[in-house]
Image (spheres, rainbow, N blue to C red):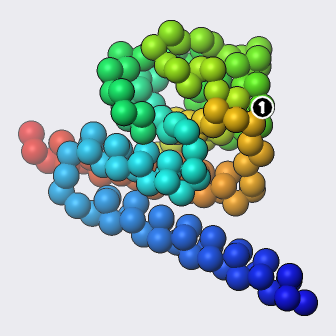
Amino acid sequence: MAVKARELELRLERVEQQLRLFQRVSRLMTRDIDLDDVLHEIVSLISDFLKCDSCLIYLAEEDQLVLYATSDPDQRSVGKVRLRKSEGLTGWVARERRLLAISREAYSDPRFKFFKDLPQDTYEAFLSVPIIAQGKVVGVINVQNREPRVHSGDDMEMLSTIGEQVGTLLLLSKQKLAEAR
């Protein structure tokens, strides 16, 4: 009985952490700060919540996905890493509009594309969701771990929900730019 109660306590604690994460992302959407700063804060929040080694946000620019934010201290790849929607695991997620979870050896997947500028390309585990706004894929969020990891259904659902929030954020950002013109 004590074990079951402890399991329930841990589950409740995780749900409360998830709720706080959603609240923090929601509050970022209401602040008047630069889109790049918001995206960097979001990758930081995701990294902390999922205890991952890397979080990346790619945004769609025409037929390409461009790296806009990373949790990595080295920011040199931001804006430089670009791939077509027909390339790599990230492109597959955008093209198929589906979540992708690989628990080990993500670099061995036949859809994988290596980028020399991304050390994450040697990481084992990969979780990725599309960022969708008004029915269109406008980006992709990737979470990676150096060691193998099986992501829970809750983690997948949480990242998908963050993807939806970021999609709304991008719409608000575009609207703000249009109004400023």
Report helix, strand or loop for mark 1: loop
Q: Amino acid at mark 1?
A: Arg
Can you say whether 179 is above or below 141 in the image? below
Which residue lies under the disc numbered 1? 104
Which one is in front, 34 or 20? 20
| Residue 97 rendering spot, x and y as whole percentages | 63, 36
Residue at position x 36%, y 16% from top? 80
Residue at position x 70%, y 35% from top? 147
> Which quadrant is the C terminus positioned in?
top left
> Would residue 100 be seen by someone viewing this image from the given angle?
no
Which one is in front, 167 or 47? 47
Which image quadrant is residue 3 in? bottom right
> Which quadrant is the N terminus positioned in?
bottom right
> Would residue 127 be seen by someone viewing this image from the given angle?
yes
Residue lying at the far left of the rendered structure: 181
Residue at position x 49%, y 54% from top? 48
Can you say whether 160 is above or below 30 in the image? above
| Residue 11 rendering spot, x and y as whole percentages | 71, 74
Horizontal side of residue 41 vs 132, given as left or right = left
Horizontal side of residue 33 vs 29, given as left or right = left
